[in-house]
Amino acid sequence: MPEYGSVQRHPLMSLFYLVIFIILGYALSSMLAIAVLFMINGGSMASPANMSSKGSLLLMQSIVSIGSFIAPPLALHQFEKRSGSEYLKFGGKISGRVIILTVILMFSIAPYIDWTVKINQMMDLPAFMEGLERWMREKERELAELTKHLLTMKSPADLMINLVVVAVIPAIGEEFLFRGCFQTIITRITRNQHLGIWLAAAIFSAIHIQFLGFFPRMFLGALFGYIFVWSGSIWPAVLAHFVNNATAVISAYVMQLKGKSLDSMDNTSTSLLEASVSLSFALLICYTIFKISKQKKEVLND
């Protein structure tokens, strides 16, 4: 609700301020991370190629993620509060049924996401874009190796640390930034809720620089976006994002307990039939969440 005497800022100006906050947040958090690692390592920086530097990588990722993804949305939320623009939607009572259905939804949609990953990886660019495709696949391999390095866990303590760094922080930060801010601003610019959701999801996917998983991640981003809109709160979207990431972390940990290689995580065998059933069930849950949220809004408006 706009405060008395407030004038809502133009969405392009809001976007400008958000980008400025992101640049400042990234620059300051990167400098802080480098300074902290410099002190921890006794005046030298650890090499990412060494296993001993994994803790340094996780610490640096945490600091930079907080500075780049969590701080900028909070800054914009506070900066524009008087203009009547509400981004993060912290308040409001969330239905317990929506929370439960959100968790079930993420497990239900997993086979479909696995199938889309496989299809996305099979896609080839035209011959004249061969150089770009080669670069994309090389970048994908580099990021995959880094991910496996970070997901190497030997104890429950490693699992808890990875859950915080890989699941909790990204779930909060990326939902605050992409759903809370980018999606809201784009929706205000286009005046189209669906366009806002899908464009924000495309930006969300592109920022990960993992092009062979672009479409599955964009689909997930859109799903988080609809959950945010239907529930009227950022927290169900954060929960959905957390469940998605935490499932991958826990799966990697269990695989290592069984003595399996993390390379087998890339071997998805979901069939078209399984993917279709998964998507159908997920859409049914989405419709249920939508109906619950709609009924709640109707009650509040009466």
Image (tube, rainbow, N blue to C red):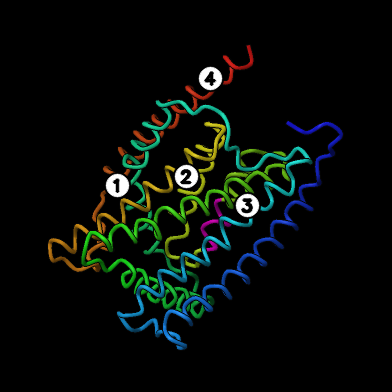
Could you tell me the amino acid type at mark 4? Lys
Could you tell me the amino acid type at mark 1? Leu
- Which sits earlier in the primary sequence, circle 2 or circle 4? 2
Tag 4: Cα neighbours inside 10 Å, few (<14), some, or many (≥20)? some
Q: Which residues are magenta?
A: 201-207
Quadrant in the rendering for residue 99? top left
Can you tell which mark lies on residue 171?
A: none
Q: Which image quarter holds the C terminus?
A: top right
Q: Which residue is mark 2?
A: 238
Can you tell which mark lies on residue 73?
A: 3
Report the mark closest to the observer, 1 or 4. Answer: 4
Residue at 47% in and 56% down? 170
199 and 239: which is toward the camera: 239
- Which sits earlier in the primary sequence, circle 1 or circle 4? 1
Tag 1: Cα neighbours inside 10 Å, few (<14), some, or many (≥20)? few
In the rendered structure, are the residues bearing label 2 and label 4 in contact, judged by CB atoms less than 8 Å apart?
no
In the rendered image, the vertical position of residue 94 relative to residue 85, given as above or below: above
- Which sits earlier in the primary sequence, circle 2 or circle 3? 3
Q: Find numbered disc 2 in the image and state the secondary structure of the residue it sits on.
A: helix
Q: Is residue 2 left or right of residue 209?
A: right
Q: Which residue is mark 1?
A: 272
